[in-house]
Amino acid sequence: MRVDLRSDTVTKPTPEMRRAMAEAEVGDDVFGEDPTVNRLQEMAAEMLGHDAALFVPSGTMANEIAIKVWTQPGDAILVDAESHILHYELAGPAVLSGVLVEPYPIERGQIDPGEIERRMRVADDHTPGTTLLCLENTHNRCGGTILPLDQCRALCECAHRYGLRVHLDGARLFNAAVALGVSPQAWTRHVDSAFFALSKGLCCPVGSVLVGSQEFIREAHRVRKLFGGGMRQVGVLAAAGIVALQTMVDRLVEDHRRARRLAEAIASLPGFEVDLETVQTNIVYVHTARPAREIEQQLAAQGVLTIALDPHRLRLVTHHDVDDAAIEYAIRMFQQIG
Ligand SMILES: *Cc1c(COP(=O)(O)O)cnc(C)c1O
């Protein structure tokens, strides 16, 4: 048996998506003339409660476009110390936007607004001005944790009081929404821009959608072109996104239930520890007594694929292509190698 728990990005498009892709009506999207892309963008903007949206090739590009639009070279931006922007985007903010990235602390997904306030820089002859606060929900490196709604509101209020913009990296925003049983707008109503990924738990082959005001999206469209992300008859990809928003959101609860089962079973085994409080959606971090790389290899030999993220930390992610039987098999393999 093969159980791929490395990431929810390994999900394959469903048969319904493939049909929609084959039949998609298309046009030149750089001219804004792809009707399927336009429909996806309208749906996304409405679901997140913003005026406009832009289909982009990746979540990384969505973040980097937002940073570019909201800043000038020499500005400072605040990102949390465990964020995707800081760890996995190749110093993109420095390279693409020329900004100083200042990390603020995050602990098990929790952020103290006081820490944001302490790091706020007011521009003068010596100091770059802070112009953007970035948030992440759910939080990848913290274990798929949900940004608490009251914290999101307090952080945005604080940022706006100082004249900062707020961008939300919501690669797994729908996981957070489904887990709490609320609309994604519970978070996005407070922020100036946000994106969600179609290519993770929602199973699309490619794509993310960035949302914001008309003015923000107009500028984002230019920056997307600058970054080489202007695509042409891309309705063939957007078609899968429409199916995803219609059919793949509510089922994310299944992924969360399976992550919980996996986490609780592994937590009870010697040699492994799981912080069960952080298992809130579809990601499970396992702390390993032995080197994580060794466990990763032993599991892989049994067909269970994971990622050793840190020397003693394994990441497991549940998704559409992992069913109950696969979860039980993975648990048996953890028991066997433990
Ligand atoms: C995956 C991810 C991204 C980037 O998405 P890509 O489409 O892989 O570029 C950004 N932020 C978070 C939190 C992610 O998990």
Image (cartoon, rainbow, N blue to C red):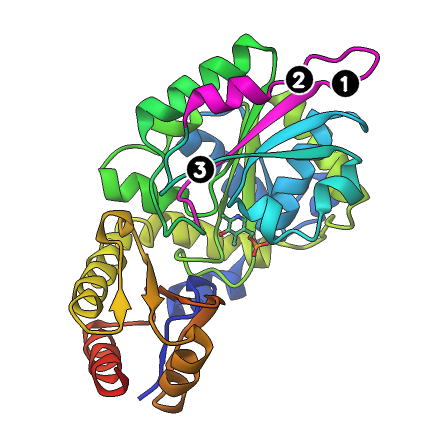
Question: In which quarter of the view is residue 53 placed?
Answer: top right
Q: Is residue 21 magenta?
A: no
Amino acid found under the numbered disc labelled 3: Ile
Residue 229 to residue 264: above or below: above
Farthest residue to the front: give it.
289
Write the start and end of the magenta stretch as one range: 112-140
Amino acid found under the numbered disc labelled 2: Arg
Q: Is mark 1 within 8 Å of ligand 1?
A: no
Q: Residues within 10 Å of mark 3 (few under 14, many from 20)?
A: some
Residue 38's tag is none
Q: Residue at x 29, y 54 (%)?
A: 252
Q: Secondary structure at mark 3?
A: loop
Residue 205 to residue 38: above or below: below
Q: Residue at x 43, y 31 (%)?
A: 48
Circle count: 3
Q: Position of residue 271 (x, y in %)?
A: 26, 73
Q: Residue at x 60, y 54 (%)?
A: 88
Compared across the picture, whether 140 is left or right of 223 comes to: left
> Disc 3 designates what residue?
106
Residue 121's tag is 2
Q: Position of residue 64 (x, y in %)?
A: 67, 41
Q: Where the C terminus falls, by quadrant?
A: bottom left
Is there a contact, CB below 8 Å, between mark 1 and mark 2?
yes
Amino acid found under the numbered disc labelled 1: Thr
Upstream in the sequence, badge 3 or badge 1? 3
Q: Residues within 10 Å of mark 1 (few under 14, many from 20)?
A: few
